[in-house]
Image (cartoon, rainbow, N blue to C red):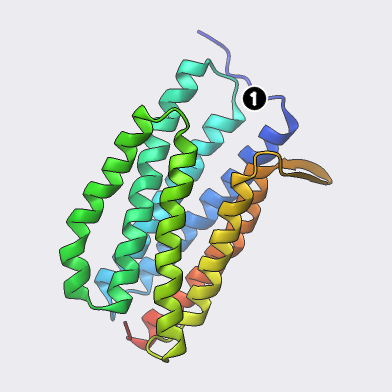
Amino acid sequence: MRKVEFIDIPTEQTTAITDAILAVMALAAAIYIYQLGQQQPWKANLWAWIFGLLALAALLGVIAHGFKMADATRTIVWYPLFLSLGLLVALFIVGVVYDIWSLAVARRLLPLMLVIGVGFFGVTLLWPDSFLVFTLYQAIAMLFALGGYLWLAAGGRLDGAWLMVAGILVTIIAGGVQAINTFSFTFIWQFDHNGAYHLIQMVGVVLLVAGLRVGLASGGG
């Protein structure tokens, strides 16, 4: 049996550690949002799934970045990670549609978005640079979400919408940083573009949870 070994590359170590922290935060967010869902259980359950998928993707990231393994094994780990990310983004769009239009529209859209999420996973199996595909996929979804929540916030149509705008803006910034492969910095430890993405996305998670808490508590949306 091959011995399990931790990675010895400093930037991969910080990427794995920040992935672990993000996984814990996302799981806590999923549980918290689920518990707030008395008035809008469908919406709360949807966002609990979104944060749950983020937690799963981050946990898989810990494995992919934190341990030494053969390239073929690492590729296998990335498959469920990309599936989680594809479904996460798809459900995020459904959550935006719920707030912009209604539960009925979101329900009708859900099956289509699940198909699109799985379809994105299928593309990553064939595309040589899968993370570039995810970056574009996420960017389109986040720009749609940003426009939707800006419209809701500006018109006072949804309590907590400005917090959602802030969370999405932070998520977009995080995605932009992650797309810059040469990005790195040192603050006590060494971080590359992936570790920086995780740090920024943690702030995004906090803002999104705050916005959802206000919206769910008000019963609006």
The quadrant where residue 152 appears: bottom left
Return the residue found at the far top: 1
Q: Position of residue 102 (x, y in %)?
A: 23, 78
State whether residue 126 is above or below residue 29: above
Q: Nearer the viewer, residue 22 or 139?
A: 139
State whether residue 197 is above or below residue 108: above
Q: Position of residue 71 (x, y in %)?
A: 51, 17
103 sits left or right of 181 in the view: left
Q: Nearer the viewer, residue 75 or 122?
A: 122
State whether residue 182 is above or below residue 2: below
Q: Position of residue 65 (x, y in %)?
A: 59, 32
Q: Residue at x 74, y 32 (%)?
A: 10
Q: Position of residue 31 (x, y in %)?
A: 41, 62
119 sits left or right of 81 in the view: left
Residue type for callout 1: Phe
Secondary structure, mark 1, is: loop
Q: Which residue is mark 1?
A: 6
> How many marks can you see?
1
Return the residue found at the far bottom: 156
Q: Residue at x 56, y 51 (%)?
A: 22
For the C terminus, the quadrant is: bottom left
Q: Residue at x 64, y 25 (%)?
A: 6
The quadrant where residue 203 appears: bottom right
Crowd band around label 1 with a 10 angstrom C-alpha radius: few (<14), some (14–19), many (20+): some
Q: Residue at x 46, y 70 (%)?
A: 146
